């Protein structure tokens, strides 16, 4: 979990306002409407824009009332200097091999599925996210960065699936996926056996087609 004090460019009054409103960490803001937060004393547009940018870096987002970000296909290299999540040189297969327990098998299964559907090589983003393709985002404050089109993270507690909800058929397919929970920007599953893998492939295909 990420402390608000770890989000670059944000100040203590913003941190206190969010914490006093019942949001202890950055991740707890996933799906919370922009309008409800901007109304809090101590919360301003600039700080909240930086919060939104930090959420986007993690595959999360404020709720639908956020002013949001403009998303375009492709990797531009134009990234705000304080954004810490980038493509790394780590081999995704080696990363998955180094996981523990059932996460190794789950990671390899998802590498196979995403790779087969997209036809793209996986890339490590930050320490634990595996992404396919690339997009560029510009937030309403002007902060910009590169991200992946779709991907996953085989975390200890849950597997996060990124970039699958916002395609034209994303919500329709999500209802057929199986056992999941969701944040604004990603879908969480406990294990691949809990979902319909054919539906997952369809969601990946829809997302990939959205690259234009």
Image (cartoon, helix red, strand yellow):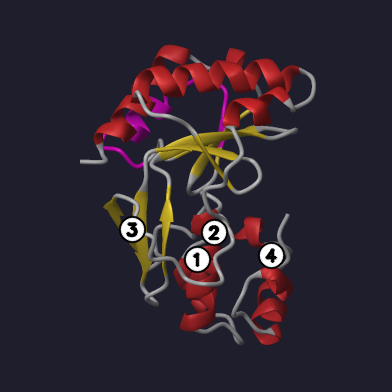
Image height of 27 relative to 150, above or below: below
Q: Is residue 169 visible?
A: no
Q: Looking at the image, which residue is at 53% across and 53% down? A: 86
> The C terminus is located in which quarter?
top left
Residue at the disc numbered 1: 52
Rounded to the nearest whole Å, what is the CA distance between mark 4 and mark 1?
Answer: 14 Å
**Quarter residue 28 falls in:** bottom right
Q: Looking at the image, which residue is at 66% across and 73% down? A: 18
Circle 1 — which element? helix
Q: Mark 3, mark 1: which one is toward the viewer?
A: 3
Circle 3 — which element? loop
Q: Is residue 171 visible?
A: yes
Magenta span includes 173: yes
Q: Which residue sits furthest left?
A: 212
Where are the magenta residues, as a range? 166-181
Whichever of labels 3 and 1 marks the residue nearer the N terminus, that label is 1
Whichever of labels 2 and 4 marks the residue nearer the N terminus, that label is 4
Rounded to the nearest whole Å, what is the CA distance between mark 3 and mark 2?
Answer: 20 Å
Image height of 205 relative to 2, above or below: above
Q: Looking at the image, which residue is at 49% across and 49% down? A: 184
The mark total stands at 4
Residue at the disc numbered 4: 23
Circle 2 — which element? helix
Residue 29 as seen in the image, left or right of residue 79: right
Rounded to the nearest whole Å, what is the CA distance between mark 2 and mark 4?
Answer: 14 Å
Residue at the disc numbered 3: 76
């Amino acid at each position: 979990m990420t402390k608000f004090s770890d989000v670059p460019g944000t100040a203590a009054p913003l941190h206190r306002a969010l914490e006093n409103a019942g949001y202890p960490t950055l991740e707890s803001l996933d799906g919370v409407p922009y309008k409800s937060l901007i109304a809090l004393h101590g919360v301003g547009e600039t700080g909240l824009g930086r919060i939104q940018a930090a959420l986007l870096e993690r595959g999360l987002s404020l709720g639908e009332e956020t002013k949001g970000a403009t998303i375009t296909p492709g990797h531009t290299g134009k990234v705000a200097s304080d954004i810490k999540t980038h493509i790394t040189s780590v081999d995704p297969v080696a990363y998955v091999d180094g996981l523990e327990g059932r996460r190794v098998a789950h990671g390899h299964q998802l590498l196979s599925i995403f790779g087969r559907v997209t036809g793209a090589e996986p890339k490590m983003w930050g320490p634990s996210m595996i992404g396919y393709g690339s997009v560029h985002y510009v937030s309403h404050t002007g902060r910009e960065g590169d991200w992946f089109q779709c991907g996953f993270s085989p975390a200890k507690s849950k597997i996060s699936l990124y970039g699958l909800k916002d395609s034209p058929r994303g919500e329709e397919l999500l209802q057929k996926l199986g056992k999941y929970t969701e944040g604004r920007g990603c879908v969480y599953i406990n294990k691949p056996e809990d979902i319909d893998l054919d539906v997952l492939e369809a969601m990946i295909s829809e997302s990939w087609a959205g690259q234009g």
